[in-house]
Image (cartoon, rainbow, N blue to C red):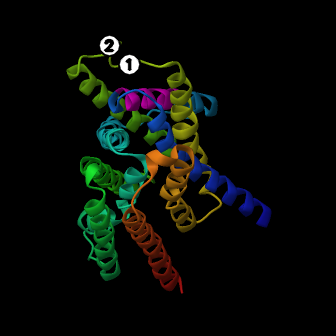
């Protein structure tokens, strides 16, 4: 059993590292954010559908559930769209630091969505996140629009996670993901239609783009999702969520290593980003203590 746990811990860190690499691919791919995300989702749908066919999973669910999943897919599509757009107009470090505020948004959205009381430590940690954001916003003034778009992406990510939290136990997770991705593809197709359609100008692929998009749609989209489901059979949700919180750290370190001068930020940025990341880890720690006390 210890060897099994070690294997799954290492596998989980690999998956989180891959998610961190997603931002790197967003920088490398020359397409604009809209056609980039459309292509990513299309590849992801194909890979997941192939997986479902191999596993002989049944996609037949109630029409009302399909409709709900398609609608919720709009949210994840908009999250990815704003995420990659933020990278295009700012840089990877700014985007990932701001994306870490997802836990801050969740602390306010969860009580409203689940109709529970606000938790004091979550509010206090939320205030610390605001301090970190103010430091970044004040000293990285050239990236103000990128910061706002990245914060929008974090809000959409938190909203999607909360919505999906209620759906996870209703149907097979892979089936839910398939329909949500189809919904996301539909809304992006509508956006593309109003932006000139599927023209060579919108989908002006460079030779390396095919490689990066193939990696993004399969290894960085379909594979981590399917693998995470399997890992959660062996590791606790807390362990999984705590490890996922390392994604911005992996991503920022990768960006600094690969792009150096392009990702060089002011000391205030790194201090602000550190405050945000620490609040995310503290939030996970307090939640785990609360669960442990309930079990006792």
Q: Quadrant of the N terminus?
A: bottom right
x then y, percent, for residue 114: 29, 65
Spatial CA distance of label 1 from label 2 is 6 Å
Q: Residue at x 39, y 46 (%)?
A: 91
Residue 172 appears in view: no
In the picture of the structure, the residue carrying the numbered disc 2 is 199
Q: Residue at x 27, y 47 (%)?
A: 149
- Tell me, yes or no, whether the highlighted magenta stretch contains residue 13: no
Q: Quadrant of the C terminus?
A: bottom right
In the picture of the structure, the residue carrying the numbered disc 1 is 203
| Labelled disc at residue 10 | none
Q: Are marks 1 and 2 in contact (CB under 8 Å)?
A: yes
Q: Quadrant of residue 243?
A: bottom right
Relative to the observer, which residue lies in front, 271 or 278? 271
Q: Quadrant of residue 84?
A: top left
Query: Where 118 sits versus 16, above or below?
Result: below
Query: Relative to 72, is 247 on the left or the right?
Result: right
x then y, percent, for residue 160: 34, 51
Q: Residue furthest top?
A: 200
x then y, percent, for residue 62: 36, 37
How many numbered marks have been drawn onto this rendered protein structure?
Answer: 2
Q: Main secondary structure of the magenta part?
A: helix
Relative to the observer, which residue lies in front, 168 or 46? 46
Q: Over which residues does the magenta segment extend?
A: 35-46
Label 1 neighbour load within 10 Å: few <14, some 14-19, many 20+:
some
Q: Quadrant of residue 106?
A: bottom left
Q: Residue at x 29, y 39 (%)?
A: 71
x then y, percent, for residue 119: 31, 79
Q: Secondary structure at mark 2?
A: loop
């Amino acid at each position: 059993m210890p060897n099994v746990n070690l294997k799954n811990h290492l596998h989980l860190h690999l998956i989180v590292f891959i998610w961190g690499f997603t931002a790197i691919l967003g920088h490398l791919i020359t397409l604009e954010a809209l056609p980039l995300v459309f292509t990513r989702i299309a590849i992801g749908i194909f890979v997941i559908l192939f997986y479902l066919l191999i596993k002989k999973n049944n996609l037949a669910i109630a029409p009302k559930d399909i409709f709900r999943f398609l609608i919720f897919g709009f949210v994840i599509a908009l999250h990815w769209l704003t995420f990659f757009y933020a990278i295009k107009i700012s840089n990877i470090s700014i985007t990932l630091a701001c994306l870490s505020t997802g836990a801050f948004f969740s602390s306010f959205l969860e009580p409203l969505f689940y109709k529970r009381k606000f938790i004091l430590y979550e509010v206090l940690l939320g205030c610390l996140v605001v301090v970190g954001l103010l430091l970044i916003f004040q000293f990285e003034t050239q990236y103000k629009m990128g910061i706002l778009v990245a914060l929008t992406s974090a809000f959409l990510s938190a909203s999607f996670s909360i919505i999906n939290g209620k759906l996870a136990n209703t149907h097979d997770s892979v089936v839910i993901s398939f329909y949500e991705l189809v919904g996301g593809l539909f809304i992006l197709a509508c956006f593309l239609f109003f932006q000139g359609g599927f023209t060579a100008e919108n989908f002006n692929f460079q030779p390396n783009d095919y490689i990066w998009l193939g990696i993004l749609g399969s290894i960085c989209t379909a594979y981590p999702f399917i693998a995470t489901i399997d890992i959660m059979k062996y590791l606790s949700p807390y362990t999984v969520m705590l490890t996922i919180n390392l994604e911005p750290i992996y991503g920022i370190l990768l960006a600094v290593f690969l792009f150096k001068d392009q990702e060089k930020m002011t000391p205030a940025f790194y201090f602000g980003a550190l405050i945000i990341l620490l609040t995310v880890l503290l939030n996970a720690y307090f939640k785990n203590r609360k669960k442990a006390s309930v079990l006792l």
